[in-house]
Amino acid sequence: MGGPADRARQTLTEAPADLLLDRLAAELARSYGVTSTQLYQVDYRLSVLLPLGAGESITGPGHPAWRCFDHQEPIVAERTGWFPVGMRGERRGVLRVEPVPDDPDAIRELDTIATVLGHELSAVTASTDIYLTARRSRRLTLAAEMQWELLPGRSRIRPSFSLAGQLEPAYAVRGDSFDWSDDGRRLWLSVVNGSGEGVAASMLTSLATHALRNARRAELGLADQAALADQAIYALHRGGQHLSALLLELDLASGAMTVVDAGSPRLVRLRDGAVSEQVLEKQFPLGMFEGTDYREQQFQLRRGDRLFVVSDGVVDATAQRIRYGETALDRFLRRTGPMEPLDAVRSLIGDLRAFVAGDLVDDAVVVCLDWLGPQP
């Protein structure tokens, strides 16, 4: 067997799904003299780091654990090491190790091990509930459980793009959702502004999401993807229920964007510090009428452009009869320029929570996409 990092990797690969952290802790004790190993996962609101098992949660933004999570780099403070846990841009949480070896090579190895842990957590999540359960600071509603299970993740990073999204109220979201996929040449993104209440809203969004995925995986164009989802919803509800959606396809080499706007959420572009709304041709929501003929339109992104997709729950958030509105939204989006997409999304949701002094009442979805330009 190879060095300590290789042994830790094999330990994680061979460990039972429910014992990843226990087996890793034993291996780190043998290889690095570590006496305490703990995993902290970020909760659904992106507001607290929760320990796996017993321990205190971490909320303070200045804490080393949050600095590690925010900057995605190891933080060592008083012989305690914090290492980001995630995979392919999806931030899962942080790994706490103490005492951390006073050796730069060991710190780099522990950083690699934390990333391997992130991949293994993703691999085993479908077969055990213990990691999902530990990520909750409160109980999810049934509708929210269904919505979170639909998501492809909360963030994604590739050389040519960076992407993140968030649902609110995180523990009680009903119909708003997003989905994405990429094949190295193109990125597909859909954002749904759901309608209805409770489980009924979640079921409608689930039907639309699966219909869009089915059409996308059949390699249909955007207009046909929208038409198939429209037909699936209309066939079941005969126009009694419908929902708004925005479908996007980005050519990662050229920045050419193809769009279908089915009564969609708002699409906003941040370019060179200036915010502008991308004007789209509004078409009928999915499922409103039988046999709707959807049309595609195109526009061009420049290297470094940032797009935000926000549902009406964002601009219509209300506190003391005052609406958050487009002006406040645009002003805040300008401030997100230096932030990574997940941090930008999290900051906007935090600003909304501060505005309403608590959790949002209506559903809201925020998605942020950076096109970084063509890559080799």
Image (spheres, rainbow, N blue to C red):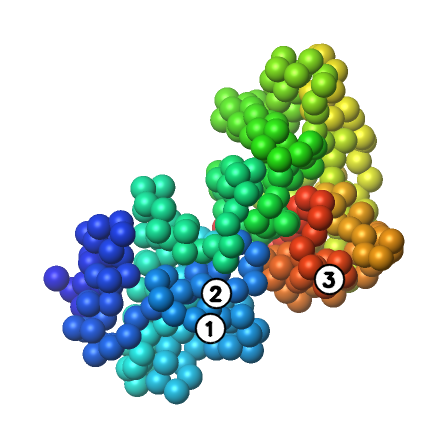
Crowding at mark 3 (Cα within 10 Å: few <14, some 14-19, many 20+): few
Discs 2/3, front: 3
Instruction: Identify the element where label 1 is drawn.
Output: helix
Which residue is denoted by mark 2 in the rendering?
A: 49
> Please, is residue 355 above or below residue 366 in the view?
below
User: Which residue is at a point 37% across and 72% down the rendered structure image?
Assistant: 96
Residue sitting nearer the eye, 63 or 354 = 354
Q: Quadrant of residue 56?
A: bottom left
Q: CA distance from mark 3 to mark 1?
A: 26 Å
Which residue is denoted by mark 3 in the rendering?
A: 357
First in residue order: circle 1 vs circle 2: 2
Q: Position of residue 346 (x, y in %)?
A: 62, 59
User: Which residue is at a point 65% across and 24% down the rendered structure image?
Assistant: 226
Name the amino acid type tagged 2: Leu
First in residue order: circle 3 vs circle 1: 1
- Count the marks: how many? 3
Q: Is residue 346 visible?
A: yes
Q: Position of residue 19 (x, y in %)?
A: 24, 56
Discs 3/1, front: 3
Q: Is residue 108 visible?
A: no
Which residue is denoted by mark 1 in the rendering?
A: 65
